[in-house]
Image (cartoon, grey):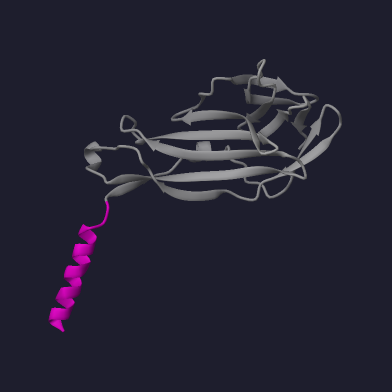
Amino acid sequence: MRNTLSLIALLLALQACNKDSYFTLTPTNDIVQFIPNNTTEKRYRSNTDDTLSFLQAGIDTNYIKSSQDIGSTGNVGTLDYVEVREHTATLRGVNNPYKVNYRVYSQYDPSLGSRSRDFLDITFFEDNVEQGMLSFIYTDSLICVSERCGFEATLKLQEKSFSNVYFLKRDSISRQSFYINTTKGFVGFRTTDNKIFELID
């Protein structure tokens, strides 16, 4: 019996030695809050009095083994890999061809005290064709890094004004746009046929 217990203890110790060394990066709530988590429809009105709705069913969370070369991590020691917690969600049009995809994730950065930098990608689709994407980095504050990213402290789309709005600038090639802010999320968009929709409620 004693030999059996010793053998079990030895096997457990060997198994513990074979475990990978890693840590998990988790995005902060400050950036996760940009993903809508509503189970009721969000309604939008156009400049031609069309009304449509979007619905988002929930946030999916996955753990992904990062392919990033982490090397030595200083006081943390040597790690085999970094595991990244990723949040994704889709705001889908109800009986309409539009949708918005959200992705929040982190990346290891040894120069930061938190050891991670958070990222947010928001992509707008029409008929399953990508019309544009806004990408953000978050450390202590949110910074939009997309080439065509714009910001307005107050932006009036039609009848309503929204504060602190990030948007995709239109140009001669891409006429579509979409608008987001921290409090209401996806507040409006422009379509390929130049309709302007704004959030009703």
Q: Quadrant of residue 12?
A: bottom left
Q: In this rendering, is residue 185 above or below 19?
A: above
Image height check: is 135 above or below 80?
above
Please tell me which residue lies in front, 22 or 96: 96
Query: Where is the N terminus found, in terms of image quarters?
Result: bottom left
Magenta span includes 115: no
Residue at position x 57%, y 39% in the image: 102
Toward the top, the furthest residue is 172
Quarter of the picture holding the C terminus: top right
Tell me what residue is drawn at x 16 percent, y 69 percent.
Answer: 10
Residue located farthest toward the left when viewing the structure as drawn: 3
Q: What segment is highlighted magenta in the picture?
A: 1-20
- Decide which of 174, 177 is in the foreground and name it: 174
The residue that appears at 47% across and 29% down in the rendered structure is: 137
Residue 9 rendering spot, x and y as whole percentages: 18, 71
Q: Is residue 11 magenta?
A: yes
Q: Position of residue 168 (x, y in %)?
A: 63, 23
In the picture, residue 148 is in which quadrant?
top right
Residue 196 point in image, percent of width and height: 77, 26
* Residue 174 spot, x, y in % from top left: 66, 21
Q: Residue furthest right?
A: 49
Residue 159 seen in the figure: yes
Instruction: Determine whether, in the image, residue 134 is placed left or right of residue 4.
Output: right
Q: Main secondary structure of the magenta part?
A: helix
Q: Residue furthest bottom?
A: 1
